[in-house]
Amino acid sequence: MEKELWKGNEAIAEAAIRAGCDCFFGYPITPQSEVPEYMSLHMPEHGKVFVQSESEVAAINMVYGAAGAGMRAMTSSSSPGVSLKQEGITYIAGAELPCVIVNCMRGGPGLGTIQPAQGDYFQATRGGGNGDYRTVVLAPSNVQEAVDFVQEAFDIADQYRNPVVVLADGLIGQMMEPIVWHEVPKRKLPPKDWATTGKHGRDHTNVVNSLYIDPAECDDHNHHLDAKYAEITKNEVRFEERDCDDAELVFTAYGTPARIAITAIEQLREEGYKVGLFRPITLWPFPEKPLHELAAAGHVKQFLDVEMSSSGQMIDDIRLAVEGQKPISFLGHAGGVMPTVEEMVEAAKKALKEAK
Amino acid sequence: MAIVYQKSAGLTDKELHYCPGCNHGIIHKLVAEVMDELGILDTTIGVCPVGCSVFAYNYFNCDMQEAAHGRAPAVATGIKRTHPNSPVFTYQGDGDLASIGCAEITHAAMRGEKFTTIFVNNAIYGMTGGQMAPTTLIGQKATTCPLGRTKEQAGMPIRMAEMLSTLDGCVYAERVCVTDIPHLNKAKAAIKKAFQKQLAGEGFTFVEVLSTCPTNWGMTPLKAKEWLTDNMIPYYPLGCIKDIDAPKAEVK
Amino acid sequence: MKKEIIISGFGGQGGLAIGKNLVEAGMAEGLEVTWAPSYGPEMRGGTANCSVVLSDKPVGSPVFARYTELIALNEPSLVKFEAGVVPGGTVFINSDVVTDKVSRPDLKAVYVPCSTIAEEVGNPKVSNMVMLGAYVAETKILKPETIESMIHSMFTGRKAKFVPLNIDAFHRGMECVK
């Protein structure tokens, strides 16, 4: 299949259209504005719905309405905008609606900066809004993965009736890279017989709702959600191990830092250092077990976590998975500064030296 | 035996949870009767708010969605844009619509979203226990203005029907009440007209229904009715504020 | 083989477009490529730049602190980015706009009067193609035929009349490198 050169944000939008996205609701914010821009032109061409909402709050609630009415719905934004969407996301999770949310992360807190960052890991993987819930979080580290994950996200969302977040960053959104539009495997999906489409002869009304006023019922509902999250955890964990077979030091990184780490590993390997990469692809469910097993391997002396975050966020999950078996050091920048290959090489050498 | 009256097919058998003397029950009935008479119960999708009518999805005999506080117009936008042939309505109170959801209702009206909003204005937050709403009258006491609302502290109450009627996308705005049979008949006619204009694809339609809250106003139902007539209607005048054909798109 | 290139100039000068041309031609030749723009306030009139990687192996980092080549289309770009070029690297300069010279003795400098040549071939808009020609001739990383066929596919239908102009500009740029 032929390679095509695509800008990340536009590729994400096109991927959604190819995945059968029925409607897109969005609001401009750098560095993801090319997604609504692309959608505004191309969704109507396919007879699909595009609305530029008055706010991110409205956009996610439009997603709620359309998803509740059985449609494949999507919104995209960047960090401050995704914060605003948290209200809608918890309602969507509570009402068990499928939808896809793309976050091209930028530096925070507050207005922060428009450059790439990874400070929304906690928000994405811990729910972000009120209550006990989880969103599936897919973290692409290049444009090809962004395209593949967005398409698959719609199926994952429909299979589990759960919001799926594609957590990219400003670099992935803004950069151009060759991609291939290959077939993304399609899942067997349950019918949306719960959707509010109008009764059309049905003997009962369908209700989309997250309100369970009776505490016992609300407890039951939460346990029901928990069982679903356990099922997702069992089925959907994804990660990549690279050069880990003999690695003494293992980088842990996701998204953009993970691809920067690949260059660092090449350099370090050329100099004879045994280093590898463990890259979580699903940030939730987190690949806890495989990382735990890797930490148990005799040749692994230590981990070096690299994030675009000042003191690290994913590192908490790394620690939970490693469970103290091996030491973990950290390299990170926040506020839109990206870790460089040189820094990673130096940090790895330092860590390996100290371990000896 | 001849049946002279029966509950509308637009309502379920679920018992209403509303306080004695509250007008929500009557307004539910009118909306239900209109949907039944228009023959749209099988196709309509409704959206209910957060507030006293939060459980409205239990009462209307059509598919329903429960929205986050104030967001019903955004939810309805998502539904209507993807189901342009389905009748869609939101049912919202004054805290929901005029306060936290003011942006959503305004922009839905601006876009001329083709759904109908039933706005129940009782000049107070009912569900949370009688706090001041944007619609609370000057001098009216509430738990967050225990000495009575003042203009200096909280500004003047908001007239949503008038405000929304300034937007080209809003093709119909009328204010009604349900204090007696004549008013009730007018209210039902307004609700019906709003749905009919929606079905004709004309634009956003809005019916504001003044309503009593005996519990939080601290009055008997009868006294509350009088208070509404004497105090609310002078500030929130009844009648049709806007009724136009679909606006033509114009770029100047 | 791996080229890491910074292309920088005023917004509207076409630096980002040179980068896109490079990655498109690179992709056509089977190379692994990335193009990453600086984005933000500078796109409103200040200096904009992009980072381009052309490599025979999959691209890890699309951004970098050191680079093999710099294409500087304006003065501030030379000031800002000269220090990051690897020793022995090359700096391409639009000498019609930048009056300063490359200060480091360990770098090769290629001065290209892009604007003058573009005027000579008949259209100031093709100054990018002049610079692209200079880059291709100097680095020999891409075949001139690849650029030429890319130009053909860029201008089709009613725009096909611009093909000879662009190819002319590209060749004139190549001739700047001796």
Image (spheres, grey):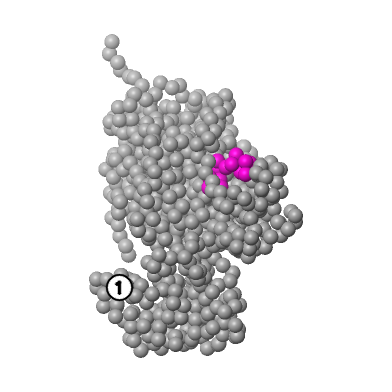
Q: Nearer the viewer, residue A109 or B138?
A: A109
User: Which portion, as a residue range, is magenta?
Assistant: A280-294
Taking the image as drawn, is residue A13 in sight?
yes
Residue reaching furthest to the top: B1
Q: Mark 1: which secondary structure?
A: helix
Q: Position of residue A315 (x, y in %)?
A: 65, 48
Relative side of B205 to A130, left or right: left
Q: Position of residue A250 (x, y in %)?
A: 63, 52
Please give the name of the residue rendered at 64% of the width and 46% of the height, measured from the top-left corner. A318
Up the image or down, B53 lies above or below A352; here it is above
Instruction: Reply yes or no: does residue A212 show up in magenta.
Output: no
The residue type indicated by label 1 comes to His
Q: Which residue is mark 1?
A: C152
Up the image or down, A65 lies above or below A203; here it is below
Relative side of A236 to B161, left or right: right
Which quadrant does the C terminus of chain C fall into?
Answer: bottom left
Q: Nearer the viewer, residue A236 or C161?
A: A236
Please give the name of the residue rendered at 63% of the width and 55% of the height, measured from the top-left corner. A274
Q: Nearer the viewer, residue B225 or A49?
A: A49
Instruction: Reply yes or no: does residue A293 show up in magenta.
Output: yes
Q: Position of residue A1 (x, y in %)?
A: 35, 55
Up the image or down, B204 lies above or below C32; here it is above
Relative side of A253 to A351, left or right: left
Please give the name of the residue rendered at 62% of the width and 55% of the height, measured from the top-left corner. A275
Relative side of B138 to C151, left or right: right
